[in-house]
Amino acid sequence: MSVFLLRRFVTFLATLAVASVVVFFVLELLPGNAAEVILGDTATPESLAALQAKLGLDRPPLVRYLDWVSGLLQGRTADSISYGSPTAELIAERLAVTVPLAVLAMVLTVLLALTLGVYAASRHNRLGDVGVMAASQLGVAVPNFWFAILLILLFAVKLQWVSAGGFPGWTEDDGGGVIEGLKSLLLPAVALALVQAAILARVTRSAVLEVMREDFVRTARAKGLSRRQTLWRHVLRNAMIPVLTIMGLQFANLITGTIVVENVFVLPGIGRLVFQAIANRDLVVVRDVVMLLVAVVVVVNFVVDVLYAMVDPRLKASDA
């Protein structure tokens, strides 16, 4: 297992290094520059040159790349062009919305997917199985932003149970509180969880059905365990290996896939920050946010590999 984890760790570091190069130089290839956006079309060449020097845009790309990477390694980030404050502060402030949203969506995804997946597998080729598979196929096909709009129309406009958007904050001083904050994140979390739950339910069903055909399941039934006991005590635990892998990937996708939903619900999260930064051509913010999202995906994948190595005994045996 140690050899497996060492290889994954080397791959983890190499992926981050390659991603930083790609992120930086792809943004460098975009036409125009931030100085032109800030000063507008009426700017004189002298004022453009002065602002480019202030922003460091007059330096060679390689020098700026090395300065950016060394700053990230030291925990230092550049100031945002639009906001005038370090990008680390902006990102930390927005993560206070995006991370709870992703966690809430992941909890809903796991609860729905495991329940429906096990239910469908226990009723293989019966009406319940067909119904769950049909519903999951519909969930995969429906875009989450369209489902988000339907949720707003039903629960905010028609029933008026919740607000149509916005975030009141986590403290009462901001006019909100924990309960109000979670309440404002509930509909966005449901919209995000729909597609992920549909995918995970199908994976869970397939994994459970595969394990149910194993010899140890028949042995457990022969010893007198009921179908329900066998399913929850033995089958589900052994079926969790592929399910755990998908869950890790889905959590990373929930972190990185909030851009559209956060804009639909007007939530001040990472997605809305990067959307506004792109509109303002604030490439400093865009670069750091994209690198953060890449790092989240890579780190989550590495954690999943570690958990996979702990759960799967075959990896331990191969390292012996």
Image: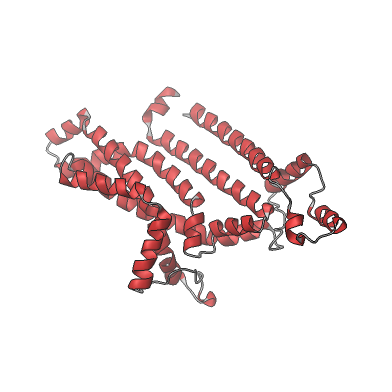
Q: Is the C terminus in the top left, top right, bottom left or bottom right quadrant?
A: top left
User: What residue appears at the point 54 percent right and 75 percent down from the top-left corner?
Assistant: 174
Camera-side residue of 272 and 2: 272
Q: How many discs mark residues in the rendered view?
A: 0
Residue 195 x, y percent position in the rendering:
37, 49
Left or right: residue 222 compared with residue 190: left
Instruction: Indicate whether 284 appears above or below 26.
Output: below
The residue that appears at 49% across and 40% down in the rendered structure is 301
Q: Residue furthest front?
A: 42
Residue at 39% x, 66% y is: 152
Q: Position of residue 276 (x, y in %)?
A: 60, 59
Relative horizontal placement of residue 211, taking residue 104 as reference (left or right): left
46 or 84, nearer to the observer: 46
Residue farthest to the right?
46
Question: Residue 231: which quarter of the image?
Answer: top left
Image point 64% across, 60% down: which residue?
89
Which of 278/315 is in front?
Answer: 278
The colour scheme used to paint the residues is secondary structure
Residue 108 percent coordinates (x, y): 36, 55
Res 217 → quadrant: top left
